[in-house]
Image (cartoon, grey):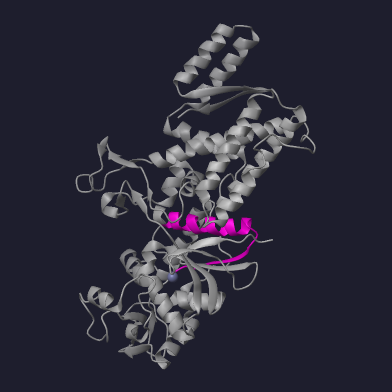
Amino acid sequence: MTAPIRLYDSMRRQKVPFEPLVPGKVGVYVCGPTTYAPAHIGHAYSAIAFDTVRRSLEFLGWDVTYVRNVTDIDDKIIKRAHETGEDPFAMSAHFADTYNQDMARFNVRPPTIEPKVTGHIPQIIALVERLVANGHAYAVDGDVYYEVEKFPPYGKLSGQTLDELKDGARIGVDERKKNPADFALWKSAKPGEPSWDSPWGKGRPGWHIECSAMTVTHLGETFDIHAGGKDLIFPHHENEIAQSQGADGEGTFARYWLHNGFLNFEGVKMSKSLGNVFNCDQIADAVGGEALRYFCVKHHYRSPVDFEVEVTVDGQPFDPIKHAGRDKQVRFYSLEAADRELAKFYETLAKVDAFMATGGDGGTGAYAPGAEDLLPAARDALADDFNAPVVVASLHASLTLANKLLESGKGIDKEMRRRTLGKLAKDMRTAGGAIGVFTQEPAAYLAERRARLVKAKNIDVAAVEAAIAERAAARAAKDFARGDEIRKRLGEMGVALHDLQGGTDWSVQD
Ligand SMILES: [Zn+2]
C-alpha cells in the first residue's frame, strides 16, 4: 500500500498532490556532483536532503528508482587535471569514488542508477542532432548552441522573462551567438583536451545536455520527480527543460521539481575566502557522520539552514589574508550539539536493548499510552512534503517515554512495560531509518563517539582503565570512600562511570 503524498513543486510554486506516472512507482532524478575535488558540506547537504526524500517515499510504500548522475567531464575537471598534471578521467573517477565513500558516512545510500556523462556520449550527440534538425539549436565553428528564442516557455521555472535573461547575459557576450542567453550544447575541443568525434568535429558536451540525455535514457521522456539544489534552478534546470522539451515536446520531462535550501554559515554563504568550505571527511572525522545527518533532518529540506561554526588560528578568529596557509582549528558547534542529542537516543536504545535481553518481549496486549503514536505521526509528516523535523519531534516524545519506563516500573504492569519498551525501540529505529538516522548498532556508535571525544579532550585511556580497576578493587575490599574518591577524580577529567551488571563502563562527558 502506498500512502498518498503532497509535495512542494518549484514549477507550480505550491504544495500539490503527487500523482505518479505508474501507480506505486516513483522515478526520481537528482543532479549529482562534478567530480574534480573532494566533496564538501554543501554537496553532503543536498545529497542528504534527497536521500531523505527517497527513504521517506520507501517508508510510505513507494517503489523508488533513484537516479543520481556523475558529471565526469566538464570545464572544471579539465582545468583541475591540467593544473595537477593528472589524467582527467582517472582524476574524476577517483573523486566519484571518494564522493560515494563520504556520502555513506552520512547514511546516504548509493543511487539505484548512477550514470556518468562519459558513458552517454552517443545519446548526447543524438539529442543535440535532433535539436539542430528541428531548429532549436545551431552549429557555429564546431560549437552547438541552444537558441532560447525558439523555446517560448524559457524562464518559467526560475520566473524570469527572456528579456531579463538577455540583459543579464550581455556582459562578455560571444558574438557568434544569436542571442546572449543562448547556451552551449556541444563545445569544440581545444588542443590537448579530451574529446569525442561528432558531426560538428571533435568536442565534448556542454554541462546541461547530459541531464536531458540521462533522464530520457534511464527514466524515459517523461518522469516523476526532478530534484537538485536551489542554485541549479537557473541556468541548469531551466536549460534542461528547454533541451528536453525542445526535443520531445511540451508536457514531457519532469512532472515535479524539488529544490533544497541553502546552507548558511551564520548568515553568510559558503565560500573559500571565508574559510568555511569544509570537506565531508573533515566533518565526519570531527563529529561523526551521523551527527551531520541528524542536524540536516532537524530542518526541513526546503528551508535555509544556519550553521554555527568557529574557525580560529592560535585562538584568533580566522583571517584569510593574515592566516593564509596556517593550520586552522574548527569547532562545529551546530554539529557537536546534534551529536550530543543523537548520543541520548543511542544511549537509550542501548539501555532498552540491554533491558530486553534480560527477559521476554512482554507478549501481546495493550501498550502504555503514547507508545503507538510514533509511526502514524511519522507517516503523516513525511507524506506532507517530507517533513522530517516533525518526525524528529515525535522521536523525542518516544525517547522521553522510553526513559521514563526504563527508570521506573512503578504503576505499570511488568509485561506491559517490557512490551512497550520493545515496541518503542523497534519503532524508533523504523521511523529513524525513514530519515536516515539510528542505523548503527548503539554499541558501535557509542564506542566511536567515545574514541572521538577521548582524542578531542586528550584523555589517557590506560589511566582511566587503571583507575577503574583500582576502584573495583577498593570496592571489593569495602573501601567505599576510596572508590568514591576515584569516581570524583575521573569526573573532573570529564569521565563518567556507569556501574552495570558485570562491570563498570565509562563515557566522556562533553
Ligand atoms: Zn542536471
Instruction: Reply yes or no: does residue 69 show up in magenta.
Output: yes
Instruction: Tell me if 75 is positioned left or right of 117 in this view.
Output: left
Instruction: Tell me if 427 is positioned left or right of 122 in this view.
Output: right
Considering the image in quadrants, where does the C terminus appear?
top left
Instruction: Tell me if 373 is positioned left or right of 160 in this view.
Output: right
Residue 17 against residue 269 in the figure, above or below: below
Residue at the farthest right position: 363
Q: Nearer the viewer, residue 207 or 473?
A: 207
Ligand 1 sits in quadrant: bottom left
Q: Over which residues does the magenta segment extend?
A: 43-72
Considering the image in quadrants, where does the N terminus appear?
bottom right
Toward which corner of the image does residue 445 lie, by quadrant? top right
Residue 251 on image: x %, y %: 49, 80
The residue under the point 80% across, 37% down is: 363
Instruction: Tell me if 376 is positioned left or right of 467 in this view.
Output: right
Instruction: Reply yes or no: does residue 363 show up in magenta.
Output: no
Q: Can you see residue 109?
A: no
Residue 294 on image: x %, y %: 50, 45
